[in-house]
Amino acid sequence: MPIWNWPHSWQNRKIVQHIGVGLVVFDGSGDVALINNAAKRLLRVPRLGNIDDLDRVGPALTTGLRTLGPRDQQLVRFEAEGEPIQLALHASVFRMRDREHTLVSLYDIGGRSKKRKWKRGRISSASSPMKS
């Protein structure tokens, strides 16, 4: 059952979709119960039904997600749209409705979005008036 079907979940959904950290929750068979907008952006996918679908993005990514255990951390490198991507994966495992689920947070540690944020910060700093 998707996480969005939980009672009072519309508040949680709004929060999870707004977070800048990529989040993916999947069960033991790889079925995705939750993926937020940040994760879709990092993984270059519009939607995700099963983590095995990420093989087309990068087999190393699917393998990385499948092998994560409780409190594991892993660095995954792959190429998407001709661009090298480096993601740090952090996992947590929990039970929901008698099924084990893995929550993975994804952090871009060297990709395009990090550079964009730096450039935006630099432009903001350069255009701010100087105080003396």
Image (cartoon, helix red, strand yellow):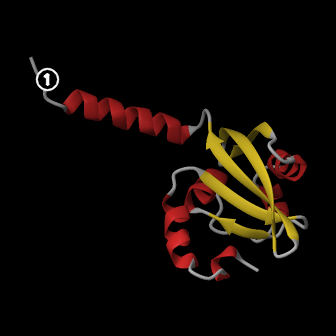
Q: Given the current orientation, which residue lies at the most extreme left position?
A: 132
- Residue placed at 67% from the left, 49% from the top? 105
Q: Quadrant of residue 88?
A: top right
- Residue placed at 85% from the left, 62% from the top? 52
Residue 48 appears in the rendering: no
Describe residue 106's horizontal placement relative to residue 115 as left or right. Answer: right
Count of picture labels: 1
- Residue placed at 44% from the left, 39% from the top? 116
Describe residue 30's horizontal placement relative to residue 121 as left or right. Answer: right
Residue 73 appears in the rendering: yes
- Residue placed at 65% from the left, 56% from the top? 23
Q: Position of residue 29 (x, y in %)?
A: 90, 67
Q: Quadrant of the C terminus?
A: top left
Disc 1 crowd, CA 10 A, few/some/many (<14, 14-19, 20+): few
Q: Quadrant of the N terminus?
A: bottom right
Q: Quadrant of residue 51?
A: bottom right
Q: Is residue 73 above or below residue 99?
A: above
Front residue (pair 122, 68): 68
Describe residue 121's horizontal placement relative to residue 12 as left or right. Answer: left
Callout 1: helix, strand or loop? loop
Q: Position of residue 121 (x, y in %)?
A: 35, 34
Q: Given the current orientation, which residue lies at the most extreme top position?
A: 132
Q: Which residue is mark 1?
A: 130
Q: Position of residue 53 (x, y in %)?
A: 81, 64
Q: Position of residue 20 (x, y in %)?
A: 51, 51
Q: Amino acid at mark 1?
A: Met
Q: Is residue 96 above or below residue 86?
A: below
Q: Is residue 39 above or below residue 120?
A: below
